[in-house]
Amino acid sequence: RLVESGGGLVQAGGSLRLSCVGPRMILSTFTGLFPMAWYRQRPGKERELVATLGSRGVTNYADFVKGRFTISKDNTKKTLYLQMNRLEPEDTAVYYCNSVTNSVSWGQGTQVTVPS
């Protein structure tokens, strides 16, 4: 399964980098998950797509994070990242990673809190 980390409490305008690791996956299993994505679930809302990353590096972002968030990966570390800059209170959510087909069991996610 995948394990998310890196969340926390940060003031508006601050930054965080989230990580998503497949610690028990062999490399081919991890790379076979792509395209992968970050999702988030804000309080009282449905889970929503934040950003996607294809195996060849093509990225797509939800309009509400364009220009602020960057998705990337390090295959050697079997890790997917989400660099989040200029955080806003509306970014408060639990963040999850998965393949775009949601082929992996959902992890616990990592909580990001940006106080207003």
Image (spheres, grey):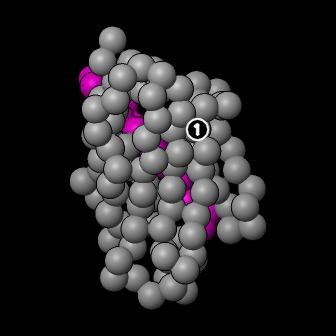
Residue beneath label 1, please? 69
- On the rendered structure, is 48 left or right of 114? right
Residue for point 33% across, 82% down: 24
- In the picture, the quarter occupied by the C terminus is top left
Q: Where does the image place residue 41, in percent across and percent down from the top left?
A: 35, 35
Which quarter of the picture shows residue 44? top left
SS label for mark 1: strand
In the image, residue 23 sits, relative to residue 103, either above or below, namely below
Residue for point 34% across, 29% down: 10
In the image, the segment drawn in magenta is 34-49
Q: Can the viewer see residue 106?
A: no
Type of the residue with mark 1: Phe
Q: Can the viewer see residue 97?
A: yes
In the image, residue 32 sits, relative to residue 36, either above or below, namely below
In the image, residue 54 sits, relative to residue 30, either above or below, namely above
Nearest the viewer among 54 and 72 is: 72
In the image, residue 32 sits, relative to residue 71, either above or below, namely below
Q: Where does the image place residue 77, in percent across and percent down from the top left?
A: 49, 76
Which quarter of the picture shows residue 32? bottom right
- On the rendered structure, is 39 left or right of 115? right
Residue for point 46% across, 35% down: 15
Q: How many marks?
A: 1
Nearest the viewer among 58 and 99 is: 58
